[in-house]
Image: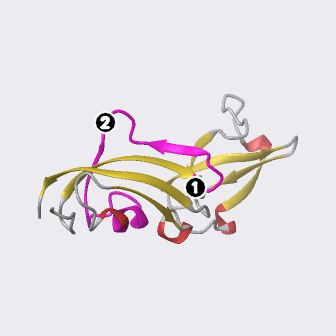
C-alpha cells in the first residue's frame, strides 16, 4: 500500500485529548485535510502521519515540545483592572486580544481576576501539555 510522504496532501480523522482523557478537539464529521511538510498542523502529528498507510489507525502521544511548545511564564501578564473597559468581559477563560508595543495583535486568555488586577496568559491554551491523538489516515488526496 501507499504510505503518506512529505508533500502529499492527506485527509485524516482524529480525536485529540489531554493525557488525563479530556477531549480538546476532533475532526468531527469531515476529515482534516493538510499537506505534509507545510506546517499546517502541529509537528508531532505531522511526523506521525508521515509513513502511515491509507486506512491505518493509530494513537500517538505528542510531547508539548512537538505540539504548542512549553508554557512560557514571560507570556503571562498582570494588568490594572481599571485599564480594562467596562464593556469587556473579563470572566476567567475569556479569550481576548491585546496589542504589543509595536501594534501586533496577541490572543490572550483571562486566567485570574480580582478587585485590583486581571491576569492574562498569552500562551496557547495547550502550551506545556502533552497531547494524545487517535488518528486514521482516510485518504491521500494528492501525492507529491
Q: Secondary structure at mark 1?
A: loop
Judged from the image, the secondary structure of the residue bearing numbered disc 2 is loop
Q: Which mark is residue 126?
A: 1
Residue 11 spot, x, y in % from top left: 25, 49
The residue at 86%/43% (across/down) is 114
Q: Residue at x 64, y 63 (%)?
A: 75
- Which image quarter holds the N terminus? bottom left
Q: Which residues are magenta?
A: 18-47
Would you say residue 20 sits in the magenta stretch? Answer: yes
Q: First in sequence, mark 2 or 1: give its number.
A: 2
Q: Residues within 10 Å of mark 2 (few under 14, many from 20)?
A: few
Q: Would you name the residue on which mark 2 appears?
A: 30
Q: Is residue 52 above or below residue 65?
A: above
**In x, y percent, where is residue 23?**
56, 44
Frontmost of labels 2 and 1 is 2
Viewer-nearest residue: 121 or 58: 58
Tell me where residue 98 appears, x and y as whole percent.
58, 49
| Observer-nearest of 40 and 107 | 40
- Give the numbered dot on residue 59: none
Q: Quadrant of the C terminus?
A: bottom left
Q: Which image quadrant is residue 48 in? A: bottom left
Judging from the image, the colouring scheme is: secondary structure
Residue at point 18%, 65% (across, down):
7
Amino acid at each position: 500500500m501507499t504510505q503518506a510522504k512529505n508533500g502529499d496532501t492527506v485527509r485524516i480523522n482524529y480525536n485529540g485529548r489531554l493525557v488525563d482523557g479530556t477531549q480538546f478537539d476532533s475532526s468531527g464529521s469531515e476529515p482534516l485535510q493538510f499537506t505534509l511538510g507545510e506546517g499546517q498542523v502541529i509537528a508531532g502529528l505531522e511526523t506521525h502521519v508521515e509513513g502511515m498507510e491509507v486506512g491505518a489507525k493509530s494513537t500517538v502521544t505528542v510531547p508539548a515540545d512537538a505540539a504548542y511548545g512549553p508554557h512560557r511564564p514571560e507570556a503571562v501578564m498582570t494588568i490594572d483592572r481599571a485599564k480594562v473597559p467596562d464593556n469587556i468581559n473579563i470572566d476567567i477563560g475569556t479569550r481576548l486580544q491585546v496589542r504589543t508595543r509595536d501594534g501586533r495583535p496577541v490572543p490572550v486568555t483571562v486566567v485570574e481576576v480580582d478587585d485590583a488586577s486581571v491576569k492574562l496568559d498569552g500562551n496557547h491554551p495547550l502550551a506545556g501539555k502533552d497531547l494524545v491523538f487517535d488518528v486514521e489516515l482516510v485518504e491521500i488526496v494528492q501525492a507529491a
